[in-house]
Image (tube, grey):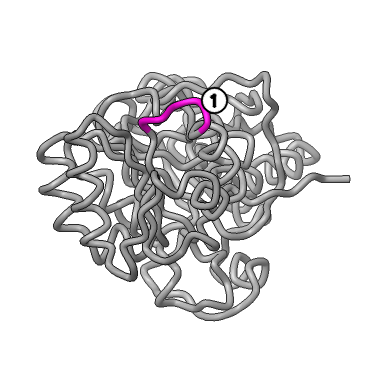
Amino acid sequence: MEQKKATRDAFGEAILRMGRENEDIVVLSADLEDSTRTESFKNEFPERFFNLGIAEQDLLGTAAGLSMEGLIPFACSFAVFITNQAYGILRISICYDNRNVKIIGSHAGITVGPDGATAQCLEDLAITRVLPNLTVLSPCDAVEATKATEAMAGIRGPVYMRLGRTAFPVITAERDAFEIGKANVMREGKDVAVLATGLMVSESLKAARMLSEEGIEARVINIHTVKPIDEDEIIRAARETAAVVTAEEHQVHGGLGSAVAEVLACHSPVPVEMIAVRDIFGESGQPEELLAKYHLTDTDIAEACRRVLRRKKEIG
């Protein structure tokens, strides 16, 4: 039976364990400790937990101040609030000053589901990856979210990590490597390369299995670090397959697809298709319904692969 687990659940377990091992770790919440899974940390370490209320600007400003005292603050809220509403503080008080603050954006993407468009953050990758000094992570499953939480605490400087609300398939193992800035090849293939992030990695693997039955071998690459992006792996994939598809639970503008296109335009231009939300806000619905409505499924990725292969053939 396929195991499913939400990345926010993995983060909550990891930060509690890390808090027991490192007294410098503190957690800040915007009155969302239940949703961001930091309630256990609050209960075990009340002296290292700060609830700033529904005030993400204060949350990030306080986190910046705590970092100046040598602490490692994890500032946690919904992605739509901590990136959109508190952007000015993130830019100036954290990134400009290169503060050692870890920003956790939970409930990202359209799979927030019934909460609707106002809570579905579809632009966080775009607006965070343009900020100097900021590392941007988007783990593909719960196992990788645990590794990413540990890794972000181990580097100095600001890091943003995108997490999801809904339980999705666990597709990586404890033994799999995780290194910030290094993409992971999840499946080899010579015909087309699918570069995906977050839960879309799982959908991409299903699409690759679907295409294999047609004689098309798709390489699937997990881009868990959107910034700094692994340029070497992207260029290698483009040169070896000559056709690229990107897949993300995010707006088509400014996210993973744009980041990959920037690399390819400079180093190895090839036909590219992008699976993403097409410049429109979401709506209320169940996660699976919304993924289907906004064309973010394995079937959509497979069809994008067929389109890009037709373009590749036309170019010769």
Which residue is at a point 27% across and 67% down the rendered structure image? 55
Which residue is at a point 22% across and 51% down the rendered structure image? 62
- Which residue carries the number 1 mark? 184
Q: Position of residue 73 (x, y in %)?
A: 32, 41
**155 or 25: which is nearer to us?**
25
Which residue is at a point 33% across and 70% down the rendered structure image? 54
Q: With 62 as the anchor, is 24 left or right in this view?
A: right
* Magenta-colored segment: predominant secondary structure: loop
Q: Residue furthest right?
A: 1
Q: Position of residue 11 (x, y in %)?
A: 54, 43
**254 or 132: which is nearer to us?**
132
Please tell me in which quadrant of the rendered image residue 220 appears: top right
The segment highlighted magenta reads 20-24
**198 or 87: which is nearer to us?**
87
- Is 85 placed above or below 195 here? below
Q: With 228 as the anchor, is 224 left or right in this view?
A: right
Please tell me in which quadrant of the rendered image residue 300 appears: bottom right
- Is 285 placed above or below 302 here? below
Q: Position of residue 313 (x, y in %)?
A: 52, 37
